[in-house]
Image (cartoon, rainbow, N blue to C red):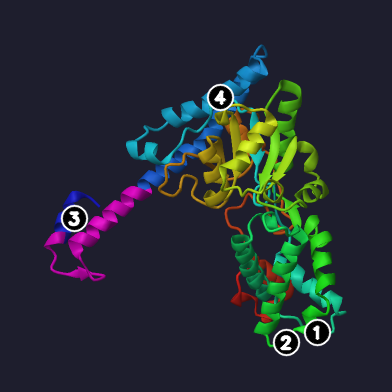
Amino acid sequence: MTSKQIEAAALQDVNYGGLPAARRANIDFERSERERIHFETATRVMNYEIQAERAEVMLSENKKLTPAEARRLRRAALKNNYYGLIEVTEEDEGVMADYTWDQEPELVTFSAYGVLYNWHLPMGLLMREALGRSHNYIHRMPPPGAFQKHFKESHEDAAYHIPCYGAHENMSSWDWWFHVFTDAYLKTINEFYMDEDIVLDKIDELVDELYYEITVGPEAFEVMPLVKVVLDRLAAWRDNEGGPKLAVVADDDDRLHVVLENLGLLPYFDFVLTSRETGYEPRETNMYEIALETAGVKRAKKGLHVGCKYETDITGSCETGMEAVSVKRFQTLYERPNDPYEFHPVYENRELLNRLGLPQADEEYMSRRRGNFWEEEEDDDDEDFLDEFYGADEGLDEYEYA
């Protein structure tokens, strides 16, 4: 709204939504200003790919450039777009970090779950099927959402009270998961007034199956879209042109090596560090200091971490002094908490290539879990997926699946 519209509203002797008309008009005006800024920011982000494509054309015409010069040219194209196409306001500067890096990293570390791979099927569904299978399906089981809800509660409780998967409690990771699965199973059974012996008579067998078989490979997990394309290019850069070392730094137990191997990801990495093996969580700087020392990187600023959880891996790597990338799909690109940490948000993994000055990844991709192109803006949630898989009459809409 214009200032004249605000003045006109002030003359009206009415209230709108419990607020004086002039105050409400001013709120609407401020909201429209924020929307304008968000639109201009989004326009700038959408146009950066055009600049990168122009850089590719320049590279194809000038074959005398070295690979390092080519990467610098791509990064310059992105930065010129950021500073050149639209005038950057002070407010934009306050919410946007530099779009590219002037220095190439010597180490790139990745979180595991949420960055490299994701659930192929929800854990609640896998637990329900394992329990039903152990009794030859003679019992009618609670809906998957009930198992999922209590698994999430039990997992979060164990992670808080017994961190690092029992590394400091003289507890094996199997024992840690035994506690989580048993607690989740019993809470679910009790909620539906079923006999606890249905779980207790089979609990060792259930935990063994879930721990050693189901949750270590493709039955439970799927590789995130375009991850292998990104890792192929980073590995080629490392092996052929002296690019950065690659590693995984994750809040996980010692089975992560097996999970990565079964998903075909382990050969890409020089080493893998887990919270179980190091005794530190990703929110702690010690974990990233161990990674830098293992890779022989002396300056933390030469390290780059790719994560997805602000409260843990992003803050931990930033406090260490490393650069950080936050992969957040279906979220406003520059929306971030009011915090001193400076990191680089992206929608998906392949944007990492552009920021490092490597050729873009334009491949289309599909997800086995969703059954539709991830390129689409709208994405069905887990609840819709389970309703289609088992039918809405199972009462799935009462529970949370994320």
* Image quarter hosting the C terminus: bottom right
Q: Nearer the viewer, mark 2 or mark 4?
A: 2
Mark 1 burial class by Cα count in 10 Å: few <14, some 14-19, many 20+:
few
* Residue at 41% in and 41% down: 95
Q: Are marks 3 and 1 in contact (CB under 8 Å)?
A: no
Compared to residue 231, the image places residue 195 above or below, namely below
Amino acid on which the number 4 mark rests in the picture: Gln
Residue 159 falls left or right of residue 223: left
Q: Point out the tag, 2 or 1, that comes first from the N-terminus.
A: 1
Q: Point out the tag, 3 or 1, that comes first from the N-terminus.
A: 3
The span shown in magenta is: 10-35
Residue beneath disc 2: 194
| Numbered disc total | 4
* Element assignment for label 4: loop
Residue 248, percent across and down?
69, 42
Residue beneath disc 1: 139
* Element assignment for label 3: helix
* Residue at 67% in and 19% down: 67
Q: Nearer the viewer, mark 3 or mark 1?
A: 1
